[in-house]
Image (tube, coloured by chain):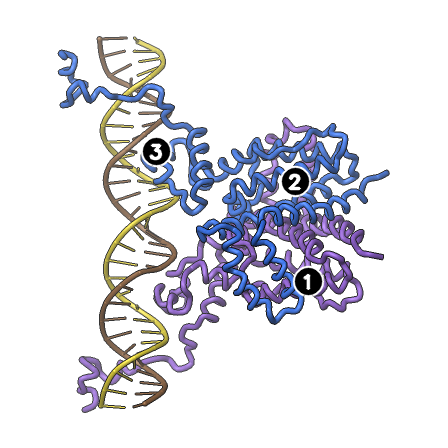
Chain colours: A blue, B purple, C yellow, D brown
Amino acid sequence: MAAAKSKQNPIPSVWARTRREPDQPALSRAAIVREAVAMLDAEGIEALSMRKLGARLNAGATSLYRHVATKDELMELAVDEVAAEIHVPDADSPDWRAAAAEAAHSFRATALRHPWLSSVLGQAGLAYLGPNLMTFSERLAALFTAAGFPEPSRAIDAVLSYTIGMSTTEAAWLTTVARSGESEADFIARLLPAAQEAAAAHDHLAGAYTDAQAATTDPVALRDDKFAGSLEIVLDGLAMRLPH
Amino acid sequence: MAAAKSKQNPIPSVWARTRREPDQPALSRAAIVREAVAMLDAEGIEALSMRKLGARLNAGATSLYRHVATKDELMELAVDEVAAEIHVPDADSPDWRAAAAEAAHSFRATALRHPWLSSVLGQAGLAYLGPNLMTFSERLAALFTAAGFPEPSRAIDAVLSYTIGMSTTEAAWLTTVARSGESEADFIARLLPAAQEAAAAHDHLAGAYTDAQAATTDPVALRDDKFAGSLEIVLDGLAMRLPH
DNA sequence: CTGGTTCGCGTACAGCGTACGCATCAGCGT
DNA sequence: ACGCTGATGCGTACGCTGTACGCGAACCAG
């Protein structure tokens, strides 16, 4: 009790001594990035603000700036964080085609799991140099080099660009669906009349949208098939480039 | 003079009669969209604000809302506006491969001319239903159907996704370069040391970045070649799907 | 002339990213 | 045991954003 009167505690009682819960990890770059990703996944890119993120970590908004220079830098870190989830098979894989397909599917799965990724890539590209993105590129390069492609970078560009294009388009669509609050099937059903009317004046589109009717039963499977199907085309093109 | 005293004019003199310059087009949805596109092209997506846009049109910010429901809707309109610039050859074109390549190149050129387009596509996809996007889709469908593809939509997805992926990546890169204020070559030169250091631990990337040295002489030609080269791979894959 | 509709504007609100400076605290050389 | 130094968290504040709301002026049909 006598200690409570020391000049270090101006007014407060001993009970103010609740100085700091011990094993609270405080605040660290890693914790911030992890929480940012969680928040982006849960509420989307436009719901992430430094204030809300701070609140989630029991911290003020500006405290984050001790560990992260700017919000843009935080987004870079978030991108690299989820880049670790993309799985590229080892270069000594016996079947290069299956390996490439697996890498593409893994990329797509990651992009659909974190739809905000597409938004960020659209604005900043993947020239990020983060360690996980680097190993992703490295493993892709290793895979296509080992497969024997004379120009591995051309092959990589073909598959990767296709995969990025398809995935961002899908992710953007899913974001739109999510904003509507409906299930994908319901959203399609509600959108269909407008789409058909808009397509009425176009011979070749009218048919395409009657196909969309089928999407109201199992849209997920339909998108999976779409991605896999066109990926085969790209892989066919690649196969022709292999020497033997 | 007597009329000036009528109750309709509380205080002002006749000179206040400068009511409205006649041929000032006032404010219209078309004019707003046109100016928004000009502004996006000139200063990038994050520089576009309703206030600045209004100021450019000699109007208040909120006046725009008489013609456009929300900023998002304005962006949709802007996207459809530039979609008109994409040229897809007629379906009766004798050489489907050249026609498809031309469409792809035109898409890319448009995306690079309006780099903000990629940002918007990443967030909203191209499920926009705007008239110009509809005719774009229609003409693509016509082209690939006329070429004789058994599954035109698969073929379209392959080329279009590749083109979107490559173009958005490039556009994002160009945006980053533009923000630096340097020329593309200078920017590469300045970035190179960091990139090489980051790639040092990765066998297959070290080589790739020495190639990048060459980009400091003519980066534009190198990107053109990159796009065209990998596009050929995709087109090869397509060719295999043609019946005969 | 009159009543309704359209248009542009001013004001206001809630939220944003972040610059700045203060208070606290850990670890240190003396 | 002491004061110093550097790192950390926080409160406040600035300038900016999108846009809801209500007003006055201008037009157009009856």
The reply to whether the C-beta atoms of the residues labelled 1 and 2 are less than 8 Å apart is no
Q: Position of residue A48 (x, y in %)?
A: 41, 43
Protein chain holding label 1: B
**Residue at image coords 65%, 51%:** B161
Which residue is identified by label 2?
A: A104
Quadrant (top left, top right, bottom left, bottom right) of the C terminus of chain B: bottom right
- Measure the alpha-carbon separation of dots 2 and 3: 39 Å
From the image, tell me which residue sits under label 1.
B141
Looking at the image, residue C4 lies above or below residue C13: below
Crowd around label 1: few <14 · some 14–19 · many ≥20 (10 Å) = many
Q: Amino acid at mark 1?
A: Ala
Q: Are marks 2 and 3 on the same chain?
A: yes
Count up the numbered dots: 3
Residue B34 % position (x, y): 49, 67
Circle 2 sits in a helix, a strand or a loop, which is it?
helix
| Foreground residue among A94 and B9 | A94
Residue D28 as seen in the image, left or right of residue A231? left
Discs 2, 3 touching: Cβ within 8 Å: no
Frontmost residue, B226 versus A23: A23
**B17 shown above or below B75:** below
Give the side of residue A117 with respect to residue A139, left or right. Answer: left
Callout 2: residue from which chain? A
Alpha carbon of mark 1 to alpha carbon of mark 3: how far?
53 Å
For disc 3, the neighbor class at 10 Å (few under 14, some 14 to 19, many from 20) is: few
Amino acid type for the residue under numbered disc 2: Ala
> Given this view, does label 2 or label 3 mark the residue nearer the observer?
2
Q: Which residue is mark 3?
A: A63
Residue located at (41% from left, 28% from top): A28
| Residue A97 seen in this snapshot | yes
Q: Secondary structure at mark 3?
A: helix
Image coordinates for residue C26, horizontal then vertical, percent = 33, 17
Q: Amino acid at mark 3?
A: Ser
